[in-house]
Image (cartoon, rainbow, N blue to C red):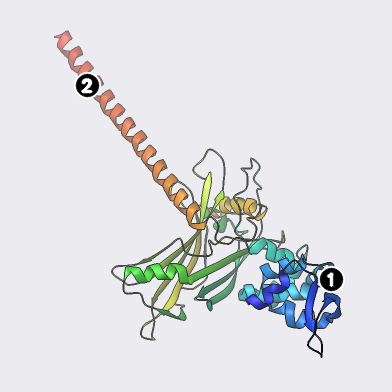
Amino acid sequence: MATPSTKVIAAEQTEIERVDYRGTATSSSLSVIHEDILRTHILNRLDGVSFLSTACASTELSSLASQDNLWRNVCRSTWPSTDLPRLQELISAFPGGHCSFFSASFPLAKPPAHSQAEPETFTEELISAVDIYHRGELIFSRAVETETASSWFRCSPFRVDLLDTKDTCPTRIPRPETEGACGELEEELTLSWVLIDPAGRWAVNVSSHRPVSVQRHWLSGEVHARFALVVAGERGTASELVQCGIVVTCGGGIQEGAMHVREVSLQMENLDRMYMSGKDSLGILGRAFGGSRNGMKRERGGRGRHEEFVALKRRRRERKLRAEGAMDTLCVASTVFIFASLVLLLMWRR
């Protein structure tokens, strides 16, 4: 991670101050610093955002910052789950290499405009690269491949699980005993879930970075941290807005006082509280992969969009209940009218 001292390099200046052997401050061009020193001792210490800012400072820094091996180090440090031979080879094949992968995966996906055309097929495989941090310390990192070509996947509810039923991951997260402790976890946990399309050479981050809610189950004591990202779907339907919901479940482990990660899963939910099928989810994700980005602000709108989505679900459910109530009233009124008409008809015949 970059320190304040290293971020000074990203300032809009090309002149540096140095002190000669007599103690006199002189001004010198940045070019006097050897390229290897800049690359090894300065640029390698910057995070991705600072790296991009540094590239804008001068032509020389821009040339250095375009080197893919430097961006490879940035991506590895940002997403340790991508440090696998196959993923590194795949990312290198992106248009623009690791730099374009960083630009696509670092920010939140911005909900794109509604599209009438939806591709019938999206990809035959999705790769999930997931990293979870607690107080800046990596506690979970895993990459999982999901086959998406089978009819079973396309017809079943879309769900990606990173852990088997009996598989757990130990952490140092203390078990919260109060609701206040759960509130602290909302500020201490961060999660990145990067979905990668190997065929289309696209990537998108479907996490809100910080949890939208952290709740403790009153009976089991398990902690459920929820991350969410809302994307656009098909206009005029219950899938007009779709939420990519991520659930991280932490429970008691062998080590007293600390919890284990027991579940990490991703699902797609529409406004009718229904989970999307694999085929429909691939169409939604296809638009998200090609959507624009929100710049470099990870936090922007994650919780706010989630709250708006929950409010829209509630209003939609209320409208549906009112419509069902009106239909029930109409049916009862029709039944009463028909019954009364039959009674009057029988009485008239007598």
Give residue 337's position: percent from left, percent from top.
Answer: 24, 20
Could you tell me which secondary element the residue under label 1 belongs to? helix
Q: Residue at x 26, y 25 (%)?
A: 333
Residue 60 got which mark? 1
Give residue 75's position: percent from left, percent from top.
Answer: 68, 72
Q: Residue at x 69, y 79 (%)?
A: 45
Question: Which residue in the rendered view is the most extreme toward the bottom?
Answer: 21
Apparent side of residue 228 relative to residue 331 in the rendered image (left or right): right
Give residue 116's position: percent from left, percent from top.
Answer: 64, 40
Give residue 251's position: percent from left, percent from top.
Answer: 38, 75
Packing grade of label 2 (10 A; few <14, some 14-19, many >=20) is few
Look at label 1 and name its amino acid: Glu
Res 26 seen here:
yes
Residue occupied by mark 2:
339
Above/below status of 150 relative to 34: above
Foreground residue among 25 and 327:
25
Q: Residue at x 81, y 90 (%)?
A: 22
Foreground residue among 66 and 155:
66
Foreground residue among 1 and 248:
1
Could you tell me which secondary element the residue under label 2 belongs to? helix
Packing grade of label 1 (10 A; few <14, some 14-19, many >=20) is some
Residue 83 got which mark? none
Look at label 2 and name its amino acid: Phe
Quadrant housing residue 17: bottom right
